[in-house]
Image (tube, coloured by chain):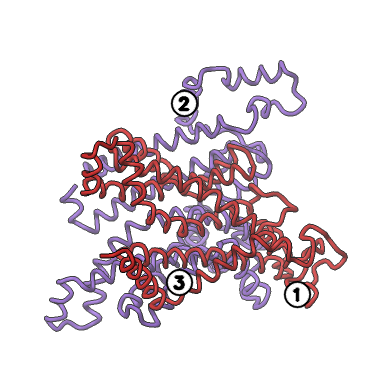
Chain colours: A red, B purple
Amino acid sequence: MSASAAAGGTVGHIRHVLSENPVTGLSFGLFGLLVLTAILGPSLVPYDPLASSDAALAAPSAKHWFGTDNLGRDVFARVVVATRLDLGMAFAAVALVFVTGTLAGVAAGFLGGWTDRIVGRVTDTIMAFPLFVLAMGLVAALGNTIANVIYATAIINFPIYARVARTEANIRREAGYIEAARLAGASTLAVMLFEVLPNVLPIMMVQVSLTMGYAILNTAGLSFIGLGIRPPTAEWGIMVAEGAGYIVSGEWWIALFPGLALMLAVFTFNLMGDGLRDIVDPRRRT
Amino acid sequence: MFGLLARRLAAALPTLAGVIVVTFLMTRALPGDPAAYFAGPAATREAVEEIRRQLGLDQPLWVQFGDYLADLARGDLGLSITTGQPVLADIAQRLPASAELTLIGLLIAAGFGVPMGVAAALRPNSWVDHLCRVIATAGVSLPTFFTGLLLVYVFYYQLGWAPAPLGRLDAFSSPPPQVTGFYLIDSLLAGDIETFTGAAAQLALPALTLGIFALAPIARMTRGSMLSVLSSDFIRAARAAGLSGNTIVIRYALRNALLPVVTTLGMVLSFLLGANVLVEKVFAWPGIGSYAIEALIASDYAPVQGFVMAMAILYVALNLVIDLAYQAIDPRVRIEA
């Protein structure tokens, strides 16, 4: 099979997946929108997200699209500006666990023995906790900072990455191309890093999208209970917390819009993850 | 059966050991110097050293770990600075509120999730299936604290159907005499219908919030497992034998399909126990989650650590129960084990 035919097959496959499930195409579009908002948002918004004004608790209007909060700050500006921080924190956590989890999992699955036992013990211990509770405990113990929220989010996602990577590395252990590389005189480390790892990566990329949604929920949940981000910073979780007290008196917009933004972001990543999985690994469809 | 129980308990021991080591490390990783923290801001250098000796923090780490284990064995999780009570007593007092909420949430999730999964599996790629997929994805995408607030706005502020989101009972009722700690059960035992309906009304929205969140994994798992069971040989045989559709779906397919769903309950519970903390904050629910949050805000660390430990032990125990239930339902697992 020539290279162009293989490429055509991949494109055809992607087109097939997209046509069968238009929602996946939609999720790619939403993802682009989120990324653009994160990059350009702060320079586009009409108001300073931290500047208060006399118009406190104003309902949504042409002047303030999403209304204003109790300090008269523009909710639309705050929601837009917060995109960068929320996506950034989740992305940092996922990038961290993508590297560490994948390497640990591949080493466990490929090397076996003690490496496997240690990685297995660590993942089992993490999974023995309800994950959000573990994240709370970690941030409380390590100190209430944004960096620690990111570390905690990475740690609670570690088992997913390590387990998937371990399984994928394990089934490739005896593959023909691995044997060939060994016979050609490559060291165990070289075989692991240059033969096994590249073949595991596509499946791990799917995990990135699936766990991004969870990471966003987790960091926002932590700031909702007062961990990590502090007022007056614009962040979706903390904005929902600030608006929570006004729900019972009918000022719904303060909590609703940041909540919707949060939901849209998580929804996008979950849908995109499902779509990517259909493209990369059609057998796993559920 | 006892041999089996003993084996499973033994298998849970390393996990429990891991939990204890992690929580111990958390107590020693407190931001800054724990001795300075407990001595207070005005303490002199000598006072801090004195506290350090009292707390055993000048000892090597393994000695500290031994002390920690001894304290644990006596059920001593430290004192809460905010309430002035032993942490264990606080947690024991507040645990039923959290347990009642989580259990009802789980029942709601299973009550809706399983039929949804079955309906989707019976007509794959139909509108029912797609609707199920959207609802399930939306369910996990909704932050629980946000769902809770939405429900409060609609059912309390707009419609006036639900009571104010302020705890387990309204201010005018007194709790029923404590038997189980579950207000729904205790009020029925006391024959107090008014308290029962009051407690149920307070519980409805927070439990629904949790249920919506946990619905997605249950519906997805039921769908996947129903699909594979429906295409198996024994279902084809049952169809060929002319059994009615309902008999096949419920008596044959669903009973077999539920087994993998039971194994995923562990993961669902992990989600639920975590989401529980957020829901308790939204509804001012007096459970262990809001206890931990109050302590966190006051920088009162012993309750937070006690809470994390209690949740982990509870979770390990629940997983053990799920494991045993699974073996009770499915004889094949017992033979293999």
A37 w.r.t. B295: above or below: below
Which disc, if any, is residue B70? 2
Q: Position of residue B266 (x, y in %)?
A: 38, 54
Please state the horizontal and vertical placement of residue A144, each as a whole percent of the image.
Answer: 64, 42
Q: Are marks 2 and 3 in contact (CB under 8 Å)?
A: no
Local SS, label 3: helix
The chain to which mark 2 is attached is B
Q: Nearer the viewer, residue A241 or B100?
A: A241
For disc 1, the marked residue is A60
Q: CA distance from mark 2 to mark 1?
A: 59 Å
**Amino acid on which the number 1 mark rests in the picture:** Pro
Determine the image quadrant of residue B312: top left
Residue A76 visible in the picture: yes
**Do discs 2 and 1 belong to a common subunit?**
no
Q: Alpha-carbon neighbours of circle 1 within 10 Å: few (<14), some, or many (≥20)?
A: some
Question: Whole-percent x and y of residue A125?
Answer: 41, 40
- Circle 2 Cα neighbour tier, 10 Å, few/some/many (<14 / 14–19 / ≥20): few
Disc 2 from disc 3: Cα separation: 55 Å
- The residue labelled by disc 3 is A24
Which corner quadrant of the image does residue B216 belong to?
bottom left
